[in-house]
Image (cartoon, rainbow, N blue to C red):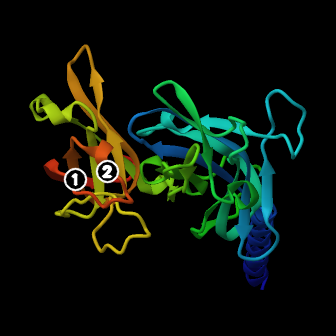
Amino acid sequence: MKRNISILSSIILSTLLLAACSSSTEEETSSTALISLNITDAPVDEADEVVIEFTSVSLLPNEGDEIVFNFEDDDSTPDEDESKMSIDLLALQGVASQPLLENVEIPAGSYNQIRLGVNAEYDDVMDSYITIAGTQHELRVPSGSQTGLKLNTPFTVAAGTADMTVADDNSVYTIDFDLRKSITDPKGQPGYILKPVLRLIQNINTGSISGTVAATLLEASHCSTGNAVYVFEGNDITPDDITSADIDDTDIDPVTASLLSYDDITEVYSYEVGFLSEGAYTLAFTCVANLDDENDNVEVVFETIDNVDVVAGEN
């Protein structure tokens, strides 16, 4: 009889311990999550700077109110009407990026839109601008100052623990701002128009590509400018020029592109493309990327074509 009581007591004690552990675990779990959001860029030809003045980041959950983060101007007190963050996107090529949000707390759950507030309109104020040959030109985003730049890509952030101080790897994202597809010169109008082409990337699922281009491929006279490597999704893709969404064209557009960089010491032409989702890609090198106007559907000649596979976390 005593033996049965001992066994029963052990069972009760084990149950209580399990309950205590369960209770402790529940107390550590939070209903919120930490998220980090960065920005990177695919380059554009002939520009020295492309500066965008961001004022805020807004996250729209599937359920609930929009969550807004206003930036604070370094030279002023926090004020919603004057807060801003100026970023030269051309400084963020390859694997480079700059934080917009770092380890900020938001409700855990599903979201369907990110909106970037910007100051970008024709008002004789160089808040957002492009610099070409040393001259600044205003950048205008149609309705950008009113509605911002919208990225309608769903994403989910999982709840973290109460003592979490750094965003989980699954909650670190980067927005790829593809300037090559975004900037247009409106004929007969002042400044330039920015129609952003944006990609939302979950960093943990991405890798990068880097390589070199043989100098012999750049010896032709037409290869003095416009040297770029286009990246197409999938292997054995027939490369083509960048096509505007307004043009009825079934050809595949590049996911992104990289300008060549020349090293005076090693005398090597190299390229680097970051933030690519894991998978198969086709790389195509051209000497006339500077002639690739998305509104003209011009024929771009590619000198070399290669297949490559991207593995998350590898270069």
Q: Quadrant of residue 243?
A: bottom left
Q: Quick one: quadrant of the C terminus?
A: top left
User: Within 10 angstroms of label 1, few (less than 14), some, or many (20 or more) residues?
Assistant: some
User: In the displayed structure, does residue 176 sit left or right of residue 221?
Assistant: right
Indicate which disc, 2 or 1, sits on the residue closer to the N terminus. Answer: 2
Tell me residue 308's x, y (percent).
22, 53
Of the pair 150 and 57, the residue shown nearer to us: 150
Q: At 56% across and 53% down in the image, what residue appears?
A: 173
Residue 299 image offset from top left, x and y in percent: 22, 57
Do tag 2 and tag 1 residues touch (Cβ < 8 Å)? yes
Left/right placement of residue 207 relative to residue 1 reads: left
Q: Which residue is mark 1?
A: 300
Residue 266 visible in this rendered orientation of the protein: yes
The residue that appears at 40% across and 64% down in the rendered structure is 244
Mark 2 burial class by Cα count in 10 Å: few <14, some 14-19, many 20+: many
Between residue 184 and residue 27, name the one nearer to us.
184
- Residue 33 at x, y = what percent? 72, 58
> How far from the left and from the top, in percent, is residue 201?
50, 57
Q: Secondary structure at mark 2?
A: loop
For residue 148, side relative to residue 78 (left or right):
left
Answer above or below: position of 100 versus 311: above
- Quadrant where the N terminus lies? bottom right
Considering only vertical position in the picture, is 39 above or below 269?
A: below
Q: Which residue is mark 2?
A: 292
In the rendered structure, which amino acid carries the disc numbered 2? Asp
Q: Is residue 178 visible?
A: no
Q: How many marks?
A: 2
Residue at horizontal 15%, vertical 52%?
Answer: 305
Secondary structure category for the residue under label 1 = loop
How much space separates mark 2 and mark 1, taking CA atoms? 7 Å
